[in-house]
Image (cartoon, rainbow, N blue to C red):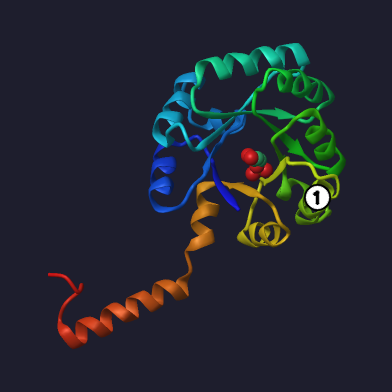
């Protein structure tokens, strides 16, 4: 399962990429606006830090197909590397995806709430679809179930589009979508940390260290 960072915070992107096998970064206008920096230099800076191989998913803002296409082409002109243009699955977004697919632009369909939206986006040429797990769960519908249904639909119809689970508020949601076959997830830095950190693991490591020090008076094997 691919793991992406859902953030535009350079420090966090550097820190997490140093620790973990990160496959890329996803952003959206809300995430970008939190950094209070000009849009294009910021995404170019993210790209510089992650390199040309890791994925960078950048979202369009317009709501009509022609404007979305223009924004998407502008983005792909300004950014090198492994760029995916994220487009929300509104009807005009689907139209834009179909147009951009002809231009061979790599696409991520975003703000996916239902399996049928995902199916339509896949048919329109999206390489990834991003179901919003927690936002769906807030509607009293299990968001992880929606991910499972999309995975099943793509398998049934032999579609190569990947599912990129997004919008997580706890690690159990991430575990559930991993078990249900999500090809990828994107999560905020605190969620990625929470996937790995565990008090009992920390406690065990402290115990190894203190036992060793008691016996040998050293903190490492190598002096
Ligand atoms: O990548 C999708 C995401 O940014 C939406 O997440 O946490 O705002 O629901 P959230």
Q: Position of residue 81 (x, y in %)?
A: 49, 27
Q: Position of residue 43 (x, y in %)?
A: 49, 26
Q: Is residue 21 above or below residue 66?
A: below
Which residue is pictured at 56% across the width and 28% down the height? 83
Q: Is residue 156 above or below residue 194?
A: above
- The outermost residue toward the bottom is 215
Quarter location, residue 160: top right
Left or right of 43 on screen, residue 118: right
Q: Is residue 150 above or below residue 59?
A: below
Which residue is pictured at 40% across the width and 71% down the height? 202
Q: Position of residue 114 (x, y in %)?
A: 84, 43
Local SS, label 1: helix
Tell me how many marks there are. 1
Which residue is pictured at 54% across the width and 15% down the height? 77
- The outermost residue toward the front is 158
Q: Nearer the viewer, residue 167 or 129?
A: 129
Residue underneath mark 1: 155
**Image quarter of the C terminus:** bottom left
Q: Nearer the viewer, residue 160 or 5?
A: 160
Q: Position of residue 11 (x, y in %)?
A: 39, 40
């Amino acid at each position: 399962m691919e793991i992406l960072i859902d953030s535009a915070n350079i420090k966090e992107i550097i820190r997490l990429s140093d620790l973990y096998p990160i496959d890329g970064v996803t952003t959206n206008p809300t995430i970008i606006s939190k950094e209070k920096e000009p849009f294009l230099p910021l995404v170019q800076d993210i790209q510089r830090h992650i390199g040309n191989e890791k994925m960078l998913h950048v979202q369009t803002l317009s709501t009509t197909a022609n404007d979305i296409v223009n924004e998407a082409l502008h983005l792909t002109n300004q950014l090198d590397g492994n760029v995916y243009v994220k487009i929300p699955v509104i009807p005009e977004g689907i139209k834009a995806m179909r147009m951009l697919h002809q231009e061979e632009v790599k696409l991520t369909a975003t703000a996916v709430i239902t399996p049928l939206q995902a199916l339509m986006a896949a048919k329109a040429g999206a390489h990834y679809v991003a179901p919003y797990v927690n936002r769906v769960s807030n509607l009293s519908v299990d968001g992880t179930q929606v991910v499972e249904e999309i995975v099943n639909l793509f398998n049934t119809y032999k579609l190569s589009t990947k599912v990129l689970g997004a919008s997580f508020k706890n690690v159990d949601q991430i575990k559930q979508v991993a078990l249900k076959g999500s090809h990828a997830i994107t999560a905020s830095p605190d969620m990625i940390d929470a996937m790995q950190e565990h008090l009992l693991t920390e406690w065990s490591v402290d115990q190894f260290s203190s036992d060793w020090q008691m016996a040998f008076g050293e903190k490492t094997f190598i002096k």
